[in-house]
Amino acid sequence: MSKTAPTSADVAREAGVSRATVSYVLNNRSDVRITPATREQVLLAARQLGYQPSPAARALRAGRGDVVLFLLPDWDTTGELGHFLEEVGTLISKEGFVCLRYEGPQWHGHLGSLLGKVTAAAVVTFSPLSDADRDAMAMSTIPEVRAWLLDGPEGHTVRIDQATVVQLQLDRLIARGYRRMIYAVIRDPRNQRFIDARVRAFRNLTVAAGIGDADVVVLDGELDGFVDALTAARAVNESRIGVCAWNDMTAVGILSAAQTLGISVPEDLGVIGVDDTPIASLTAPPLSSVRFDLTQDAAVIAANVAETLGVGSKQPAITSAPVTLIARASD
């Protein structure tokens, strides 16, 4: 059976003083006269018992909680987004706060209830709140720190723009002589908002570049689907095709289908992935991919949180781009 955590009453009993005296000492009350000997007696008893004030008590004493709440929509956080969140959390924890990630659709429209259960110092939002949740934030008086990742009516606050990812892919393929383009994506409901942003960018950028032959192909993740898609594209005409893939996994599917069909890469087909995962350098041929580096953006978000909470943190210098293209042999 686990041992019950010591309470302030236990400290008072061990020190031979009242609970009120324990409260005065542990809360460092300067308006109440406590002798140095009594103060040391209480602190010694607290140390010996391993007493820790409750989070609610600490929040009351400090005027705020210790928790920084990350509010995330129902997004896939297993890839680069997950790495970004981990970096932000690590940096915030160095300021003495605990980061709590709350993910999924359950909190939408019910933020007031959630904030009533979590003693939060600040809330970091990664997309705009609904009207109801924005009202709940205002009523709570808890500060909001924005780390919005997608364009919206009020813009985005993290430097990465989904259009920049697609622009890097297209610029490389155009420079390599491709004039027929496909945007290939594996169906993924949790990433749909990011997919929509990149597909929209692909359509706009190909028009701006004068690429008249540009299609979007949505796949189910099975090799047969990739083979069918390439077969259909080649049936229209056999000119070289440049493929902007949603991610490296999609790009690997395209490469596998090309091998199945005997299509030469990059002579007849060019493919560029996104995320630059370890598999990118292991494919045949090695896969060109767009690499993310969001460490500086994570540092900016953490600094914003620190500044909002008054613990002071200088804004970091921005010295590198958040995305770069790693050129290999697949295009």
Image (cartoon, rainbow, N blue to C red):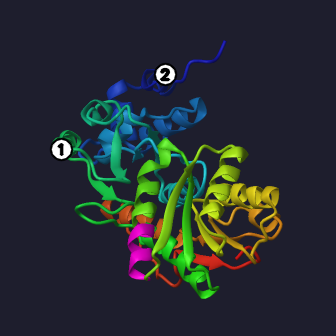
Q: Is residue 289 left or right of residue 81?
A: right
Q: How many marks?
A: 2
Q: Is residue 161 visible?
A: no
Q: Secondary structure at mark 2?
A: helix
Number of residues whose C-alpha sits closer than 10 Å to that of mark 1, classed few (under 14), some (14–19) or many (20 or more): few
Image: 44 above or below 162: above
| Residue 271 percent location from the top left of the image | 67, 69
Amino acid type shown at disc 2: Asp
Q: Residue at x 43, y 26 (%)?
A: 8
| Residue 260 percent location from the top left of the image | 81, 55
| Residue 305 percent location from the top left of the image | 37, 60
Amino acid type shown at disc 1: Asp
Extent of the magenta region:
201-209
Image: 216 above or below 186: below
First in sequence, mark 2 or 1: give its number: 2
| Residue 212 percent location from the top left of the image | 45, 75
284 inside magenta stretch: no
Number of residues whose C-alpha sits closer than 10 Å to that of mark 2, classed few (under 14), some (14–19) or many (20 or more): some
Q: Which mark is residue 131?
A: 1
Q: Nearer the viewer, residue 187 or 241?
A: 241
Q: Is residue 137 left or right of residue 99?
A: left
Image: 19 above or below 285: above
Q: Residue 284 lies in what quarter of the image?
A: bottom right
- Residue that extends furthest to the top in the rendered view of this protein: 1
Q: Which mark is residue 10?
A: 2
